Amino acid sequence: MASISVLTRTVLLHLVLSVGILRGEDTVPACDSPIYCQGDLLDIIQRMRLFNDSKTFVDMSLKQSPEEVLSAFNNLSKPISEAQGRKFVGDHFSGPGDEFQPWKPTDLPRMPAIMNHIKDPLLRGFAWDLCRTWKDLGRKIKIDVKLNPDRYSLVYLPNPFIVPGGRFRETYYWDTYWVVKGLLLCEMTDTVKGMLENFAFMIERFGFIPNGGRVYYSRRSQPPFFIPMMYDYYKATKNLTFVQSHLPAMEAEYDFWMTNRSVSVQRGDVTHILNRYASSVNSPRPESYSEDLKTASSTNNSSARRQLYQNLVSAAESGWDFSSRWFSRDPGTNLTLDTTRTTNILPVDLNSVLCMNEHILSELFNLTGNQEKGKNYSKNWQRRQTAIFNVLWNPTKRVWQDLDIAANSHRDYFYASNILPLFASCTGRNETQTEKSVLTYLQNLGVLQFAGGFPTSLETTGQQWDLPNGWPPLQHMAIWGMSQSQNQQLKAEAFSLANKSIVSNWIAWNRSRNMYEKYSTNISGEGGSGGEYGVQEGFGWSNGVVLELLSMYGDRLSVSPQCHHTSSAHAASRTRLFYHISPLVLCFVCLLFYL
């Protein structure tokens, strides 16, 4: 583990960068690499749009040293034509994808215990298919990435890992929370242990866990789920020794957020400390370079352009890239990407997750005999619950909402994140009344009635974290939070949403043998839409969420035509299912499982 001095220097660097950029000062690139994060080579090649996806170029590896590649680029005759650029890239870059060597996890047992919990044979087969899919998503980094790191944008990690899939070839921070949940349900604890060690390795190097495993992600993070991942691993394995050895890494990750992403909010005589997304980077994202240039094209002032870039990068840090959730709602403004103002918003979900982190740290320190630290984190947990209620609870709408920092007012719009204090068990007030209020809020908006599950928002903007998309991590957090309620109707709605989500995933799987990154909430079984890239297949967190929902409700859920024991509330979902898939085919598949 890194020394305290190394971690302190790293955190201080991020603090200095953050303070400077929030004042609109110097340009801060995504990393120091003169090829992958800044400079003429990146700018000229990405402006040529040689590839359909900007990420393709910055995921490629160098055939020579950076000095040799830059020298060859500088020797090109100017202006550089597209043909020259294409030949240059072919001569000096390879991949992407050649940074990895073949690897498949070997710790999948013949029959994970979750299979015995799933009543429906079709869903049991579905779960087993998903457990086997982890082998297709396994990656191991070649040793040359460690020996020659400046020839790659990929960050070397010592252990193999599971990737999301599609264009997401590397490890990602918050995706891994649901991947870990799925792996643990498939009883692949060795794979999980290695992935957690990788994150500890990243904390040692960077002082926090970056957005993903590329150098161009190294100055932004994602929602902080490392501590809950560790806790899930402990609950599954009871390996307290391993968890205890990584408590310094967990504290370093927590301290990063408290040092670099905190905001003071005054309510009466009390000063509350809450957190926001606020990367220091204020230049185009290398993996979405041409897209960011286009978004900022109508912004002529250089300071305003840097501020917009910072807000776009910070939205990427939130995981919600992009959404009307981060757009300006000032009178006369349109719901467009160039009004993104992420750093000016205190998010409900980030503070809910940090609240959960504080509770877990308290419990883990108590378990390992450090009662003093356990007590300190318990106080932090209690203080944050109070802050979430006093600052983020809207007493008029009787639900939590993001806070506009500049206006000091709630952003009164529906987003799935509004109810995530239920997921984190950080409601901060009388639970019975809170749960009743949340249920009424959801019912009045009609967001429990969508065919494909829980919508991300009610805004139609063309952005992927808006209507009509439903995202597996949001589905899971909403369902889990509602399922833990003491309100029986809210618990029933949790089951209904889980049923819709499972049916939608199962229909899509049977049509295409693919799991999607996101799904339509308008049409069951349809992949999502919108955003900077097409719907991605794989898919890590979707697999994990389905397995988690089956672990919660597998004894009650059914998609088989023979099973008529579910309540009439699920008849509509089954009708939609049979519209798409022949009952004869279903019966045949069922017969195979019974044989």
Image (cartoon, rainbow, N blue to C red):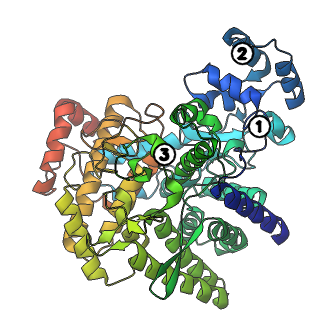
Q: Residue furthest top?
A: 83
Indicate the secondary structure of the residue bearing disc 3: loop
The picture quadrant where one finds residue 557 is bottom left
Whether the residues at callouts 1 and 3 have beta carbons within 8 Å, the answer is no
Q: Report the front residue among 550 and 426.
A: 426
Q: x%, y% of residue 152?
A: 77, 35
* Numbered disc 2: secondary structure: helix
Instruction: Give the Cα distance between marks 1 and 3.
Output: 30 Å
Q: Which class describes the residues within 10 Å of circle 1: few (<14), some (14-19), or many (20+)?
A: some
Q: Amino acid at mark 3?
A: Asp
Left or right of 458? Residue 113 is right
Q: Amino acid at mark 1?
A: Lys
Residue matched to label 1: 142
Where is residue 316? Give x, y as percent: 54, 48
First reached walking from the N terminus: tag 1 or tag 3 = 1
Distance Cα–Cα, label 3 vs label 2: 30 Å
Image-based side of 408 in relation to 64, left or right: left
Q: Earlier in the sequence, mark 3 or mark 2?
A: 2
Residue beneath the point at 50% across and 74% down = 355
Q: Which residue is mark 2?
A: 85
Q: Are marks 1 and 2 in contact (CB under 8 Å)?
A: no
Viewer-proximal residue among 182 and 64: 64
Which quadrant of the figure has residue 151?
top right
Whether residue 118 sits left or right of residue 270 in the image: it is left
Foreground of the two, 595 or 542: 542
User: Is 591 rendered above or below residue 42?
Assistant: below
